[in-house]
Amino acid sequence: MSLESRKLLTIVTESALEHELSVEIQRLGAHGYTVTDARGRGGRGVRNASWTMSANIRIEVVCPAATAETIAATLKERYYANYAMILFLSDVEVMRPDKF
Amino acid sequence: MPTLDPVVLFFLLGLTAGLLRAELRLPPAIYEFLTVLLLLTIGLKGGVELAAHPFGALLPRMLLVVLAGIVLPLLAYPVLRAVGRMARPDAASIAAHYGSVSVGTYAVAVAYLGYRGIAFEEYLAVFLVLLEMPAIVVGILLARGVGRGVQWRAMTREVLLGKSIVLLTGGLLIGWVGGSDGVAPIAPLFMDLFKGVLALFLLEMGLIAAGQAGDLRRHGVFLIIFGVVMPLASAVVGAGMGWTMGLSVGGTTLLATLMASASYIAVPAAMRLSLPEANPALSLAASLGVTFPFNILIGIPLYHRFAEFTQRLGG
């Protein structure tokens, strides 16, 4: 079985940004993404998801390293100052490289 | 008859449980569902009655209401800037919250009037739809000025296709097309369960309002005073408008309540995207932590007095 390396970009942010980010991520070259509801605590206090304005999402994108870095840099530039957002990159291996 | 409507006691239960940090949490999906039911119910009731009114006669009233939705945030903004010493985006965002409306507060006023057997013009639900948007535009213009760096298309989409406008308008149209006979088969879910749904909704609202307590403590007394004085001033404007339009006591009470209410669904979402530098903790602490509870517990009975007073003046 042959495996190829890709980056997994994980973004945890406010659910208010879901629509905007889904458009942005695809525009920057990712072929797809997965969104899940999330809650937790961080620099902006507890985000307990009890209602829309305190809800978080976790977006995962598997893509080539260059794309992941472009997305990460764009999001950092545009959203870090005013939104609850963290993102991190990790290495993953995929079986169908053409999908990502 | 007890002074407090039983549904309001559910709000107090949620508020107390939240402040005591009780292990109580409604699943977010339930809160969403309750909001959907309330929006549709109010839309349906309004639509059924709207069918009985010629649209042309309502048009001047609608324009007056939209005008109020534009003027109120313009009045609030300088106060927030000068007295509250707020940064421009924060003042603009809070002003927008207070120019817009809260469906939850409207629903409690409807329940209040129903509980006392006071008749009112159900078509006022149309004003809920009309009042959602203008304040948002005014807020963005106050913060940004004309034509600079505002993504109007994205903002318009966010607001017009947001849950509250879609469901209220949808409900109004369905009620309007169906009429009271057409709506009768679905009435058990929407109309008959209205107060039970509202009670559960208010339980959750109490929990959410209690969650604002920390932000309120941090941001001081100005927000608390503003959160009480602003709705009072707006209610006076609303009662005056109700009198001008020749509404009944119930209708005037509802219009005053509408004007006094501050948004916590459409405006926070729109502001988060259009004015990211505005701190949402400030506007939500004021609108949810102060104004919503104030309107529910003290405001609505008070606005009822305002309405009776204007009727006496008129009579």
Image (spheres, grey):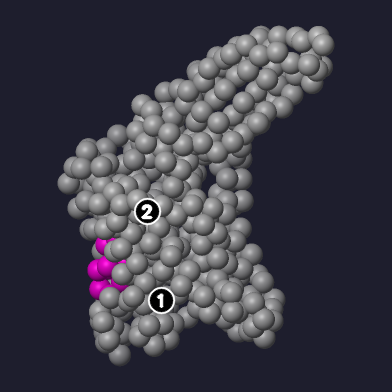
The reply to whether residue B16 is visible in this rendering is yes
The circle drawn on residue A17 is none
Quadrant of the frame with the C terminus of chain B: bottom left
The circle drawn on residue B111 is 1
Residue range corresponding to the magenta coloring:
B292-302
Pick the residue in front: B109 or B24.
Answer: B24
Vertical placement of residue B189 versus B15, above or below: below
Quadrant in the rendering for residue B303: bottom left
Numbered disc in front, either 1 or 2: 2
Q: Magenta segment: does it hold B301? A: yes
Same chain for the residues under marks 1 and 2 in the image: yes
The secondary structure that most of the magenta stretch takes on is helix
Which residue is under mark 2? Answer: B24
Q: Chain of mark 1?
A: B
- Residue B53: x and y in percent read 58, 82
Q: Magenta segment: does it hold B268? A: no
**Which amino acid is tagged 1?**
Ala
Q: Judge from the rendering whether residue B183 lies leftward or rightward of residue B209; answer left or right.
A: right
Answer with mark 1 or mark 2, whichever residue precedes in sequence: 2
What secondary structure is marked by label 2?
loop
- Residue B157: x and y in percent read 61, 45
Q: Residues within 10 Å of mark 1 (few under 14, many from 20)?
A: some
Q: Please tell me which residue is depicted at 55% across the width and 65% down the height of the picture.
A: B37
Q: Residues within 10 Å of mark 2 (few under 14, many from 20)?
A: few
Pick the residue in front: B314 or B209.
Answer: B209
Quadrant of the frame with the N terminus of chain B: bottom left
